Structure formats: C-alpha cells, structure tokens
Amino acid sequence: MKKIVAFDFDGTLTTRDTLLMFILDAKGIYTFIIGFLYRLPLIIMMKLRLYPNYRAKQKVFSYFFKGMTIDTFNSLCRHFAEKNHHLLRPEGLKTLKKARNAGADVLIISASIDNWVQPFFPDVKVLGTQVEVEDGRLTGRFLTKNCYGQEKVNRIKELYPHREEYHLTAYGDSNGDRELLAFADEAHYKPFR
C-alpha cells in the first residue's frame, strides 16, 4: 500500500506564520505598516469571524502584490526562503527526510501561497494556495480556493482519488488542519520542536 505523509507548513514545520513575514520582507517596514493599518478593519472583522478568512487574506495579498510581475514575485519568494531557513523546525525536517527515505510520497499542504513555500522544499510536492496570473502579472486574486480546512482534504483527493489505495499520515497544528487530520489514518496534532 502506498504511503503518503502530509505536512502543514506554517506553525507545524515553521516556528511562525509566514504570510506577514513574507510581506514585510518583500515590501519593507513602511509599506507593511501602511498596508496593515489600511486593512486593519478587515483583519479585525476576520478575527471576530464576521468576515471570511479567505477573502481577508486575498484582499491583503491583493493590496500588496496586485500588478507585480510573476517573475519579480517568484524572485522575492526565493529570496525569502533563502534567508529564512532558520524558521524551519529541525525535528520537522528530520521527520520529513525520514518519510522520503522510507519511500513515502511527501506533501506539504498549506494555506500559504505555494510560490514562497516551494523554495523551502524544492524537491517536495507543495499543495498551497495558488495565485492568479494574467499577462505575466499578479491579478491580486487566488486561482484556487484558500488551502485551509476541508480544502486540504479536497486537494489530497484530487491528487490521490482512490482512498483505499494509500495510508495517509498527517501533521498539523491548527484549526485549519483538523479536517486533514481527521481524514488521515495516522494524525499528529502538534508542531514539531
């Protein structure tokens, strides 16, 4: 039976969420603060569960990156990964490597934009939130649903439609991972050290 090992990224394999860190790195402190203050009402509404998480995330993303060329964006993503490997949890890396060495299909499944997750793990399949690009530029919209909650399960089912043919081990640390962990044969609900 095929073995699949799926890891959440933010908080599970990393020591913190990367969205705000990526924006700060890509745009600098001044633009980050202005944008954060501009979108603060939206973020508060999201935290109070009065506004959907995925919409708030898309609006924040759009504010900072709409109109940027995909080449520039990908370059920023690679740079971010190169200078932030210290965010990765050693125990998580060890577990990921052990799963790969054992012949498992290893996935990283994250609500983060896959463009900045993939450079951390160039040889691992990343299922993340994908950005829409038209004429070589970011539209500010997402091409896929935010890869959070049930969407994580949906993505695995798309890639591996025959559930009876594999054993799934999943690692996660937040509410956004609960459906994935419930879907798994073996679930680990905690961040690595």
Image (cartoon, rainbow, N blue to C red):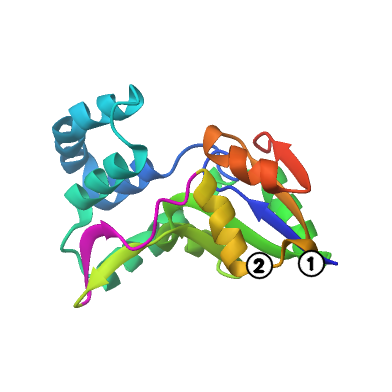
Amino acid type of the residue that numbered disc 1 sits on in the rendered structure: Glu
Q: Residue at x 43, y 50 (%)?
A: 112
In terms of secondary structure, where does tag 2 sit? loop
Mark 1–mark 2 contact, CB under 8 Å? yes
Identify the residue under disc 2.
Answer: 160
Question: Is 19 situated above or below 165?
Answer: above
Expressed as whole percent of the image width and height from the top left, the position of residue 104 reads 77, 65
Asked whether residue 130 appears in the rendered view, the answer is yes
Amino acid type of the residue that numbered disc 2 sits on in the rendered structure: Tyr
Q: Earlier in the sequence, mark 1 or mark 2?
A: 2
Q: Is residue 115 left or right of residue 6?
A: left
Q: Is residue 159 left or right of residue 74?
A: right
**Magenta-drawn stretch contains 96:** no
Identify the residue under disc 1.
Answer: 165
Expressed as whole percent of the image width and height from the top left, the position of residue 36 reads 21, 34
Report the magenta residues as a range: 136-148
- Between 95 and 164, the residue placed more toward the observer is 164
